[in-house]
Amino acid sequence: MRIPWIVGVSGASGTPYARSVLCALLDAGEAVDLVISRAARLTLLDETGATVRDAHWKDDVAAWLGRDLADADLVYWPAIDLAAGPSSGSYPARGMIVVPASTAACAGIAIGLSKDLLQRAAEVSLKERRTTVVVPRETPVTRSHLEHLIALHDAGAVVLPASPGFYASGARASAEQLIDFVAGKALDAAGVPHTLFRRWSGELGGR
């Protein structure tokens, strides 16, 4: 039986984090279901110049990721499709990673708004007690955002802010290295093996 990871991309700045997570999941041979919110399409266009059209999603996502998806186990669900597979708890899934997670997405998931498929799929993942990793990308944060993050934590989600560490690559780390660090931490929380960053060895200067 096919049991995918669901990746939700919301409208927060930080679409390169989503790209790194998606590529690493596919590299690990994982099945992936992808949901890109309406707001995320605008952010993706602004940050990368990439467009994702429902009718041409495979070509568009391949161009965004910079890889051939011919043999990839990747399924795309339009964010407006509330009858899609991931909207139901009976649909098999390993869990979900929301990356990046906007304040609106965090709020919607926390209160069970189900405004779109991304929010509904995350709510399903939580209610079914599946691994749910939420990667908020916002700074500074308001009290209401903190309250929503606490609610997500209490509901069983792993709240993993997009906060890169420098010990893996040093103070002169490239943007790609910092992006991969956050993506790697999200995959660690999901229990998916990867080689996105050098792990702490217990020794200063081990980098």
Image (cartoon, helix red, strand yellow):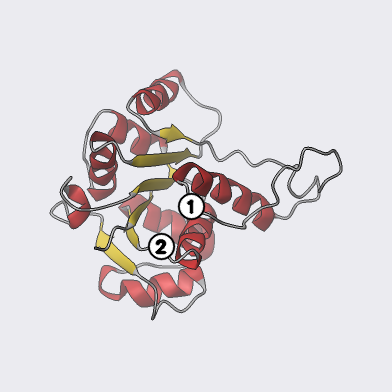
* Left or right: 35 as drawn, with respect to 82: right
Mark earlier in primary sequence (2, 1): 2
Between marks 2 and 1, how big is the CA–CA gap? 9 Å
Q: Where's the N terminus, which quadrant?
A: bottom left
**Occupied quadrant, residue 150:** top left
Type of the residue with mark 2: Glu
Residue most extreme to the right: 205
User: Which percent across, then down, holds residue 143?
Assistant: 44, 18
Asked if 184 appears above or below 129 in the picture, the reply is below
Residue appearing at x 31%, y 54% in the figure:
38
Numbered disc total: 2
Which element type, helix, strand or loop, lies under badge 1? loop
Residue appearing at x 16%, y 48% in the figure:
88
Asked if 56 appears above or below 7 in the picture, the reply is below
**Is the residue under label 1 in contact with that under label 2 (CB below 8 Å)?**
yes
User: Which percent across, then down, holds residue 70?
Assistant: 38, 81
* Left or right: 193 as drawn, with respect to 8: right
| Nearer to us in this view, 43 or 149 | 149
User: Which percent across, then down, holds residue 148?
Assistant: 37, 25
Type of the residue with mark 1: Val
Q: Which residue is mark 1?
A: 192
User: Which percent across, then down, holds residue 190?
Assistant: 45, 45
Residue appearing at x 36%, y 63% in the figure:
31
| Nearer to us in this view, 123 or 107 | 123
Give the crowd class for mark 2: few <14, some 14-19, many >=20 residues within 10 Å: some
**Which label sits on residue 30?**
2
**Which label sits on residue 39?**
none
Which element type, helix, strand or loop, lies under badge 2? loop
